Amino acid sequence: MVFFAVVNWIAIALTVWKIDPDNLANFIFTGSYLPMGLLVAGGIFWLLSILTLSSVRALRWTLAIVIFLYLRIWGLGSILNGVLMLCLMILWEIYLYKSKTKDGVVHSD
């Protein structure tokens, strides 16, 4: 996992350093920045998978972060949206933690 994370973050760094953002803006969909979005999503996912030791939790947090980043790109993201998304994600994690049975099995994952 560490290898994939390092390779992904090197690809992100090279993309930021070498490629003009205007070349990525309209790759498949207009204004989508799809290649960079996929690279960032992969990088965040691998990093969070290593930090949390849970790919399901990493996927949830990655989707929330990427959605917030796309809201910022489209001009709809604000600090309030970020705080609300953060609070929703924390509440979701608390709910999943509380819903564990005594055997340690999570029902919703």
Image: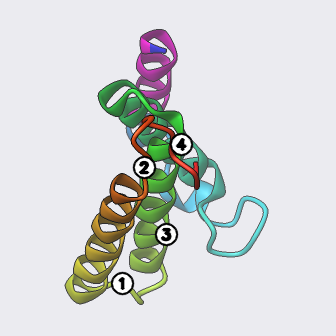
Q: Nearer the viewer, residue 38 or 99?
A: 99
Point out the stretch of residues depicted in magenta: 2-15
Check disc 1: other Cα within 10 Å, few if <14, some if 14-19, many if 20+: some
Single out the mark in the foreground, 1 or 2. Answer: 2
N-terminal label among 3 and 4: 4
Which numbered tag is attached to residue 100? Answer: 2
Is disc 3 in contact with disc 4, using a CB cutoff of under 8 Å? no
N-terminal label among 1 and 3: 3
Q: Quadrant of residue 9?
A: top left
Q: Circle 4 — which element?
A: helix
N-terminal label among 4 and 2: 4
Task: Please identify the dominant SS of the magenta region.
Answer: helix
Report which residue position mark 3 lands on: 67
N-terminal label among 1 and 4: 4
In the rendered image, residue 11, in percent from the top left (x then y), is placed at: 49, 28
Q: Nearer the viewer, residue 22 or 80?
A: 80
101 in relation to 88, above or below = above
Q: CA distance from mark 1 to mark 3?
A: 9 Å
- Check the image and name the residue furthest to the right: 28
Which numbered tag is attached to residue 56? Answer: 4
Q: Circle 1 — which element?
A: loop
Residue at point 30% right, 61% down? Answer: 94
Q: CA distance from mark 3 to mark 2?
A: 28 Å
Check disc 4: other Cα within 10 Å, few if <14, some if 14-19, many if 20+: some
Check disc 3: other Cα within 10 Å, few if <14, some if 14-19, many if 20+: some
